[in-house]
Image (cartoon, rainbow, N blue to C red):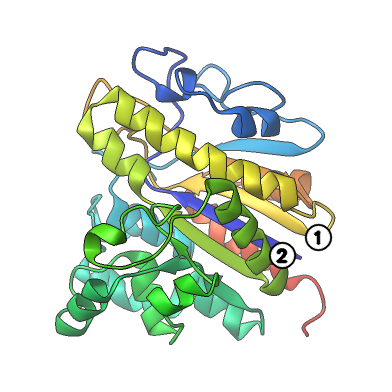
Amino acid sequence: MHVLMLFLDGVGIGVEDASVNPFFRASLPALRSMLDGEMLSLNNPELRNSISTSVALDATLGVEGLPQSGTGQTALFTGVNAPQLIGKHFGPYPYSTLRPLIKEKNIFRQLKESRRTPYFANAYPQKFFDYFDQRQTRLTVTTLSCSFVEMPLHTVDVLEKGRALSADITNAAWPRMGYNIPQIDPAEAGARLVRLAEEFDFVLFEYWRTDKAGHSEKLPDAVDALQLFDAMLQGILSNLNVNTTLLFITSDHGNIEDMSTKVHTRNPVPAILYGFRHHEVAEAMLKSPDLTVVTPTLCRFITETAAP
């Protein structure tokens, strides 16, 4: 079983109101096709059809206050209730005392220990690596996880070879950083992720523009961020083999779904499953529908098949 996971930073399930929720203002044909023409909302948070299943996951994890990326992503990518562990939500980077947990329990390590092949698809410019070498106190859960299991973070060379993807999907930001890299079509970016998913057991792509747009309080920015993602999603759906691969879309906390505020929300986050065994995986997640269910569930289903 192959899993392609799209992690969208700061995406919750919101009200059905186009004046504040860009999911009801943007043109999102690919996402709607997955959801059989519908859209997730607080009145309709879970959807099931023949090709996909959507589950609402609690991001508050029993802790007061607004969920944050550091603790939310730790819970998401380790299966441990990080906010409860430290007694608060914390972010955007993981609390220092969570680093040993991330080192030992991150999803990449769990898969590697089960002889599976994880792959983090994001590419980074040289200035990131310069920062990484100087100080590692302000790194995301995903980049920390890679470093802890000695998984390479991809450089511009890997990006140019088509073996990674820019966080902005199309490479649009790279010329502004001094790189002579052509832009790619969002649909081709999606097809690239599918090719990687066919090669590895678990592929993760992280898209942070959704959270950035949510903090901006600018509805057009939020619409643009979602429509760009949807264009990439179309490239995935057009190429994905639903007989071998599960597409999984989720987030760490709410934000962009409520553009009336620039802060995070306490809304649930979506877990959208499409393709191979989507009903079974969703049913497993429904047994404990919060962020901590993701890593153990995905690892269990990925490792069910015989080791290579």
* Residue 67 coordinates in the image, percent (x, y): 30, 43
Q: Position of residue 51 (x, y in %)?
A: 78, 38
Looking at the rendered structure, the kind of residue marked 1 is Thr
**Residue farthest to the right?**
243
Q: Which residue is mark 1?
A: 244
CA neighbours of label 1 inside 10 A, class few (<14), some (14 to 19), many (20+): some
For the point 26% across and 76% down, which residue is it? Answer: 126
Query: SS for tag 2?
Result: strand
In percent of the image, x 23 and y 51: which residue is there?
A: 88
State the quadrant of the N terminus: bottom right
Q: Are marks 2 and 1 in contact (CB under 8 Å)?
A: yes
Marks 2 and 1 sit apart, C-alpha to C-alpha, by: 6 Å
Q: Quadrant of residue 147?
A: bottom left
Is residue 10 visible to the viewer in this orientation of the structure?
Answer: yes
Which mark is on residue 2? Answer: 2
* Residue sitting at x 59%, y 82%: 112
